[in-house]
Image (tube, rainbow, N blue to C red):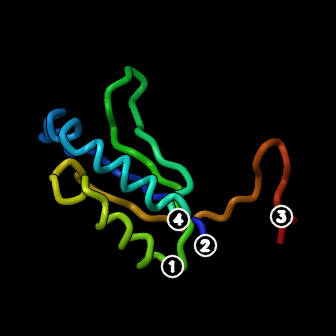
């Protein structure tokens, strides 16, 4: 199953936390690249940080949440919230992937 994992940053957490843990976070993403298919930061229209998003391939929501909680950024207080949503991809690269039900 595919999951969109949406992270909201904690406005009270400093940039130093992100900088200090970023190497470990990026190494974690690399180690788990078979499950975490895409990842990156989210910003507002003015470029301010707003959180992040992952696209995760996992057996179920529990497995996706386990990945989130193993991320070195998770225990730092940087994340205000996380939302894990099942995603049914139907369109990519200009093509419909599945027929309508």
Asked whether the residues under the numbered discs 3 and 4 touch, taking CB atoms below 8 Å apart as contact, a structural biologist would say: no
Task: Work out whether residue 22 or residue 99 is closer to the camera in this orientation and state it.
Answer: 22
CA–CA distance in space, label 2 to label 1: 7 Å
Callout in the foreground (3, 1): 1
Count the labels in the image. Answer: 4
CA–CA distance in space, label 3 to label 4: 22 Å
Task: Work out whether residue 36 or residue 9 is closer to the camera in this orientation and state it.
Answer: 36
The residue that disc 1 covers is: 60
Callout 4 secondary element: loop
**Alpha-carbon neighbours of circle 3 within 10 Å: few (<14), some, or many (≥20)?**
few
Callout in the foreground (4, 2): 4
The residue that disc 2 covers is: 1
Above or below for 95 versus 1: above
CA–CA distance in space, label 2 to label 3: 15 Å
CA–CA distance in space, label 3 to label 1: 21 Å
Precedes in sequence: disc 3 or disc 4: 4
Asked whether the residues under the numbered discs 4 and 2 touch, taking CB atoms below 8 Å apart as contact, a structural biologist would say: no
């Amino acid at each position: 199953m595919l999951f969109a994992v949406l992270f909201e940053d904690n406005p009270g957490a400093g940039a130093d936390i992100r900088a200090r843990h970023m190497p470990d976070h990026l190494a974690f993403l690399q180690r788990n690249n078979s499950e975490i298919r895409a990842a990156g930061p989210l910003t507002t229209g003015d470029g301010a940080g707003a959180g992040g998003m992952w696209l995760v391939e996992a057996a179920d929501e529990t497995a996706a949440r386990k990945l989130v909680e193993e991320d070195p950024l998770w225990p730092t207080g940087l994340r205000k919230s996380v939302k894990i949503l099942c995603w049914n991809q139907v369109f990519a690269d200009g093509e419909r992937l599945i027929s309508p039900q």
